[in-house]
Structures are given as structure tokens and as C-alpha cells.
Amino acid sequence: MISDDLDLRQLTADLKARLGPGEPVGYLRGKSLMRDLLLDMRTNRFSELEAEELVDTLESRGFVRFLGDPAERSVADAPWDITPHA
């Protein structure tokens, strides 16, 4: 369960700072990369399930947004927009 006092804006900024230029790319690869980065962050201790739920929460609240269509192969390798000020 994600704590109500978790600052999603700051977490998104931290996540964005850890990503390399142009990352992440691809819907599933991008979600997996963001989950793995959340797991590696030392300031927060998330289980793998919590990290996956957190990526889903960030996506549903507009902090991270996939710029393609994961259902269409031609745009499944699109980048993500990561906006800490959503």
C-alpha cells in the first residue's frame, strides 16, 4: 500500500534525475526500468509489488505518461514524459 504522506512530485523528480537522456523508451521496458529505479532508491524502501503499484499510481495521476500506444507495435517503442509538476 502506498503511504498518503509520500510526496509523488518529489519522487517523480528523483526518478527523472536518475534516468539517462531519452529514457525510458517502450511501454513495458519503461515501466520495468522505473520500477527497478524505485527499488534501488535508498531513501525509500519499497517491495517489488509496491514499486510496481507506485509506477501505476504515477501513471494514473499524470506524473509519468507514455507517449505512444502500447497496443500498436509501430509506436510501442515511444518514450515516456516524466513531469514532476503534474
Image (cartoon, rainbow, N blue to C red):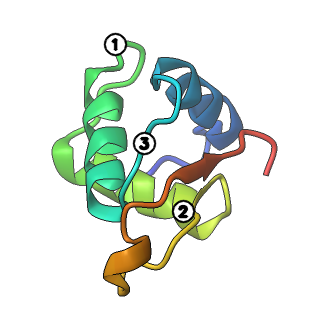
The residue under label 2 is: 59
Q: Residue at x 38, y 61 (%)?
A: 77
The numbered mark at residue 24 is 3
Q: Position of residue 44 (x, y in %)?
A: 39, 23
| Residue named by callout 1 | 42
Question: Of label 3 and label 2, which has the lower sequence position?
Answer: 3
Mark 3 vs mark 1, foreground winner is: 3
Measured in 3D between alpha carbons, the distance from the residue under mark 3 to the one under mark 1, in whole angstroms, is 20 Å
- Provide the secondary structure element on which disc 1 rests: loop
9 horizontally vs 16: left or right: right
Q: Nearer the viewer, residue 82 or 49?
A: 82
Where residue 73 sits in the image (x, y, percent)? Answer: 31, 79
Q: Viewed as shown, does residue 47 lie left or right of 75?
A: left
Residue 82 sits above or below residue 38 on the image: below
Q: Earlier in the sequence, mark 3 or mark 1?
A: 3
Quadrant in which the N terminus appears: bottom left
